Image: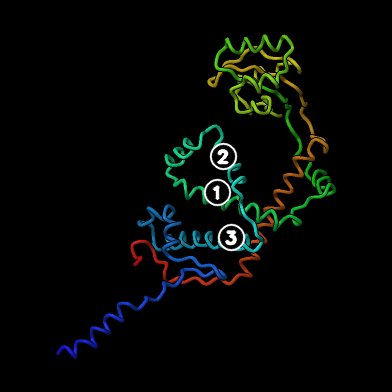
Amino acid sequence: MKTMLLPILLLALLGGCRQQDPVPPLVQIGTREIHLAQFRAEAGQALDGTGDHSAAEQQLLQRRLLAQLIDRELILSEAEQRGVRISAAELETALADLRGPYSSAEFQEVLSASGQDPQQWLQQLKLRLLTEKVAEQATLAAAEVSDDEVASYYRQHPEQFRRPAQLRARQIMLPTREEAEQALRRLEQGEAFAALARELSHSPDRENGGDLGFFSRNQLPSDFDEVLFKLPVGRVSDPVASPYGVHLFLVEEKRPAGLASLADAREELAAQLHRERKERAFAEWLQELRQQTPVAIDWSQLQPQGQLK
């Protein structure tokens, strides 16, 4: 009996030790792969709560999410080929811009409170920065805008450059009226408004000397409009209270209503045309990548929630 059992036991042991066949990918994009587990993990939040949707609705959402992941892999592959990377300094600069006045720990709490996973959010930020960097390289020539093109667009779209009366002003915002009156006395003694704004103001624009840029009526609170649009150029206002604090304003320039000149509109218009052309060139470039890269999807692995095995 023992001699008969031995070959059977050996076969069983050998079968148990044999490596299982690898799980086939859900998507093959060139040499890159996306597996079902990865897709579920990354699309989890978007797919949560769709169990009561129809099978067709679930499949449509899955296809959209899968298309986004495929595009991501195409961009990552292109970044590798071009040697494009996001440095620690670039990432920190982007994080600092997004955090604003929040500390790193406070910003983590804000993300968590909004239901976002901080690490996943960071990965998404890295991908966005990488995409922007790759797009900049891929669309650089196609997105260029010449001076003649800017002038031609200006002539063909005059209505776009009609503007209401505008003014440019600076502000100093302080917590109390007493502090605002002290600052006003310093201004009356000849101190520069912009320098004092950098020193004293509690408003985010303090770094720019309190510069609010050009604006028209109804872009700021009505109480501010009442003061600013009556204030002569070069005059500092009396203290103006708001829910945020007490403000001092300086009007630096006024523009009458009318057609903006090409010289005034050129910089903003060139930036607009460049941005539009870049977006269009990037969409065309990405579409070309999709057509050039072999993509195989195992649709049998995607089933509506509740039917996934």
Which residue is depicted at the point 39% across and 76% down? 21
Q: Secondary structure at mark 2?
A: helix
- Give the CA separation, mark 1 to mark 2: 10 Å
Point out the image quarter for the N terminus: bottom left
Q: Quick check: marks 1 and 2 in contact, CB under 8 Å? A: yes
Which mark is first along the chain, 2 or 1? 2
Q: Residues within 10 Å of mark 2 (few under 14, many from 20)?
A: few
Which residue is depicted at the point 70% across and 18% down? 193
Q: Residue furthest right?
A: 148
Q: Secondary structure at mark 1?
A: helix
Query: With respect to residue 2, does 288 lie above or below?
Result: above
Q: Secondary structure at mark 3?
A: helix
Q: Which residue is mark 1?
A: 125
Q: Which residue is mark 2?
A: 98
Relative horizontal placement of residue 193, taking residue 222 as reference (left or right):
right
Residue 42 in percent (x, y) is at 45, 56
Name which quarter of the figure residue 301 lies in: bottom left
Q: Quick check: marks 2 and 3 in contact, CB under 8 Å? A: no
Q: Which residue is mark 3?
A: 76
Residue 267 in percent (x, y) is at 77, 40
